Amino acid sequence: MTMEERQDSLDGWVAIRENLFEPVDVPNHGSSRFIVAFNHVECQFAISYSEGERHACDRDTCTARAALLFSDALHDIHKQLVLMCPALENSFPLSDSQTNGSWNFLRFFSKKNGIHERLDSSVEAKVCRELEHYFKQALDATGKRLLFCLLFGEEDYLTDYEEDIQELKLRGLERTLERTYDELNEILSLRSLSETMLNLSTVYALEDQVVVNISIALAELYNFQLGPFLELREVAAERSRALRLRADDGRLGPRVRAEATKELEEWEARAQSANEATQHLYQEYYRRTVDLVSGQRNRMLEDQTKFGRSTFELYGMQRLQKLEVFVCQERLKLLGAIKITRELQHGKITKMLEQQALRGQCTLEEMEEEVYRSQLGIFDVSLEMLKEEEDILRRQKDILDRAWQEELDEGIFYDAVEERDQLEDELEMESSGPMSRRDRLKLRLNRLYRKRAILRNKRKACVAEHQKKVKRKEEKKNRIKQHHAVHIRREEIRKELEMNHERIDSERRKTLERLREYKKKYQNGKRNADGTMLEPNEEEISRSPSPRSPRPSSRLQNGTAADKRKAFRVSSENTKEKKDELSLPVPPPPPPPPPPP
């Protein structure tokens, strides 16, 4: 189909950024100024711009720009600015309307070389002041980015004028969702004005339609956000499959296989991040749908309290029961997304535990604790899901019971039959429809009860196993602590004994020192041959008994024969030494003192 056949096709169109030409960067007039002067040497206009003020400080906050432009270039810039802001058309001082079409006025600003004629300085200054005023007006109208791009040759921001298609679509979907929520708020304002349940029934119908529109808008928005992550997950799965085959290929070298293994880990990490992002978006979507449907249910409960139960049962009970089923279904979907997220987290932690199996024991204990918590979280979410399924089945069963009771209350009339058996067959055929569905719900409830019991037993077993591990670890710590306590007690006793021995040795040394001092001070009057006191012998002092020690026994006094011979030998040697000392010449005695006068 060609472009002429499809007028609403967007093929070939380019999306332009919104508010592209808005002057969002207009500076303050008090700190910005233009200065224009004519350079007669170059026959060009010297244009400078400064923003800020110079102060006596270390940092200069004044920003300035300058350029030299011919009058023809200024005309071209003026034409582009007029396209952006038509109000500037009559403000340009060098235009034909301002100079009354006089070429003689402009030729002084357009000739380059060999011309020495000059305008009057007052006229030239007037033109420059008018240009300064014109540039200020252009700055206010278009902003700095566009004007500086044209005047000073800065980077043209208009080159990036195309809008990102993905962001444009995302903003469009968000605006559609906002409009649907605005419609819902308008309908809720009508609900506050309703005074009877009959009027509320009309509001309920409108609200249901708007809620459907909101659900569609939400689905489109989150499906659009899920698209890139789903594509990334598919690409990562394909690349991981190919890299795994390459890493396991024995025909390749070790370097190539190592590179394939490293790249495989990177793609697996990307796939893991894509899965986490998708599950996060799923949770956000289901939370919003749960809030949407729960709001409907809560408003109906308020209406039930407002108008009474009997009146509400006639017009709103059936809708309330359906909404309760919808709420349970949306909660079940949300719990399913949470369960998948926790399973992914559990797998991630398990993989990290396998990788860190050779590290410290503290790290392993922490990882095991995280694995236990994640597994317990999975069990809890699974039990909540079973509870929501039970609520759904019970509410569906209540709806069937209510419908069956209404049919019974209305009264059922049958055609005349010739035999009673035919009537019983018809009753069985009619009752087999809803009753069979009710029986199926009962069977599903029974299976759900068994499944929940099995899951609870698994959870209890997991908790019991964890408690056993914790108990074993505590017992091991207590045994180690007790062993260390015994060892520490032994060390304390050993240190105490060493201190006692040191104290005893110290007391013995002090006692010997006191004995030496005592012997020096109180000897038994022994003197040498020259009349001086004998010096105490250390061996004798060390062998001499303590005054407080008991007297030696007779056996020790008598001693053995060997001891006696040894003592005799020692005494003979001492006697010989004394004789040698006596054989030495004795000096004459000193003369007697003179008699007193």
Image: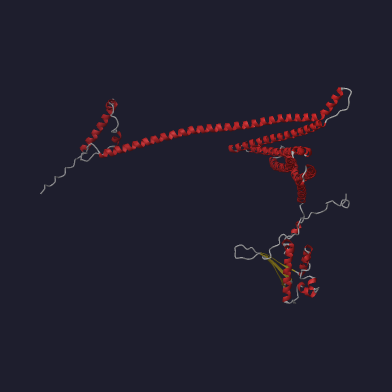
Across and down, in percent, residue 510 comes to 33, 38
Coloring scheme used: secondary structure
Across and down, in percent, residue 544 comes to 28, 33
Would residue 239 be visible to someone looking at this image?
no
Tell whether 531 sits left or right of 479: left
Tell whether 402 sits left or right of 472: right
Q: Nearer the viewer, residue 122 or 304?
A: 304
Residue displayed at 52% across by 33% down: 481
Residue 302, image quadrant:
top right
In the rendered image of this protein, does residue 40 appear above or below residue 4? below
Q: Nearer the viewer, residue 125 or 156?
A: 125
| Numbered disc total | 0
Residue 558, image quadrant:
top left
Would residue 537 be visible to someone looking at this image?
yes
Residue displayed at 27% across by 38% down: 518
Across and down, in percent, residue 235 comes to 75, 43
Q: Nearer the viewer, residue 396 or 47?
A: 396
In the rendered image of this protein, does residue 500 appear above or below residue 82? above
Residue 542, image quadrant:
top left
Across and down, in percent, residue 512 comes to 31, 37
Tell whether 577 sits left or right of 112: left
Q: Nearer the viewer, residue 105 or 585?
A: 105
Residue displayed at 64% across by 32% down: 462
In the rendered image of this protein, does residue 153 appear above or below residue 466? below
